[in-house]
Image (spheres, rainbow, N blue to C red):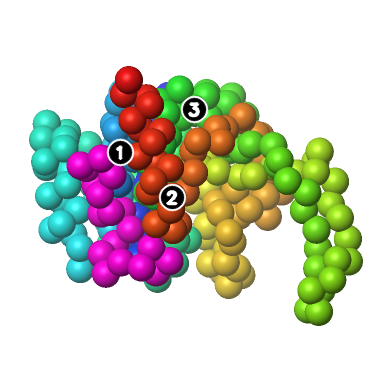
Amino acid sequence: MRAVAIIPAAGRGERMRSDRPKVLTPIRGRPLLAWTLEPILGIDAFLEVFIAYPPGEEHVIGQVIGQDFPDELRVRLVHGGQTRQESVANCLARVPADIDLVAIHDGARPLLTKQLLLNVLECANETGAAIAAVPCKDSIKICNEEGTVTATLDREKLKLVQTPQCFRRELIVAAHEKAERDGYLGTDDSVLVERMGATVHVVMGSYENIKVTTPGDIILCEEVLRRRRL
């Protein structure tokens, strides 16, 4: 199995109320991105790791790699796009044609574990497309513009989708090419694959595997990482 990883990390994170890119937010003395990279770079199956960086921040991102992973030679920095989808597409354009699997993980999910990543990789290697997701704990209701409920969804059928997501290279490349032709912007990579008619398999994720969005999420990350280091 020849695999690469793609990390879209070009988001500015306006809801973090910071003037720095979100992936540079410090968590327990390290940039958020360093925590995200640790389990990914800990897997030998990845021949290359592509990071889509925020425009103008190549030098700073390079410093993070050099300081936290000084002996790592697999990292490739790629100019990020205006959207997450464009950033992933920019990285896909750099993936060699002889690669079997492409794993995609949000740069702003620093609580990924190596085991979860391996589980998704293994499932994708067997099926062609796999994503991490967790069961929905809360009831989900559809509301109208007036703020009243119009329907309640069956919680037993709902999943909260995460990354990592992993696909056969030719499938995810074709899915992104079709989305670009159609002018379609998806909320994640798996929806682009679903539009191709392919089956996407779900692997049990982790409720700790949050995407950092607001300053309060940093507090949660610090506590989880503190507990893991005990």
The residue lying at 19 percent from left, 53 percent from top is 61
Q: Which mark is residue 116?
A: 3
Asked whether the beta carbons under mark 3 and mark 1 sit within 8 Å of each other, the answer is no
The residue lying at 11 percent from left, 42 percent from top is 66
Tally of numbered discs: 3
* Nearer to us in this view, 65 or 76: 65
Is there any visible trace of residue 160 in the rendered image? yes
Asked whether the beta carbons under mark 3 and mark 2 sit within 8 Å of each other, the answer is no
Q: Nearer the viewer, mark 1 or mark 2?
A: 2
Dot 3 amino acid type:
Leu
* Nearer to us in this view, 38 or 46: 38
Residue 16 is one of the magenta-drawn residues = yes
Task: From the image, tell me which residue sits under label 2.
Answer: 217
Q: Position of residue 135 (x, y in %)?
A: 69, 37
Quadrant into which the C terminus falls: top left
Dot 2 amino acid type:
Asp
Vertical order, 87 against 181 (above or below) = above
Residue 155 is one of the magenta-drawn residues = no
- Horizontal relation, residue 98 to residue 60: left or right: right
Vertical order, 149 against 113 (above or below) = below
Mark positioned earlier in the residue sequence (3 or 1): 1
Q: Position of residue 46 (x, y in %)?
A: 33, 31
Q: In the image, which residues are magenta?
A: 13-31
Task: From the image, tell me which residue sits under label 1.
Answer: 35
Residue furthest to the top in view is 230
The residue lying at 55 percent from left, 32 percent from top is 206
Is there any visible trace of residue 129 in the rendered image? no
Identify the element where label 3 is drawn: helix
The residue lying at 12 percent from left, 49 percent from top is 63
- Horizontal relation, residue 138 to residue 31: left or right: right
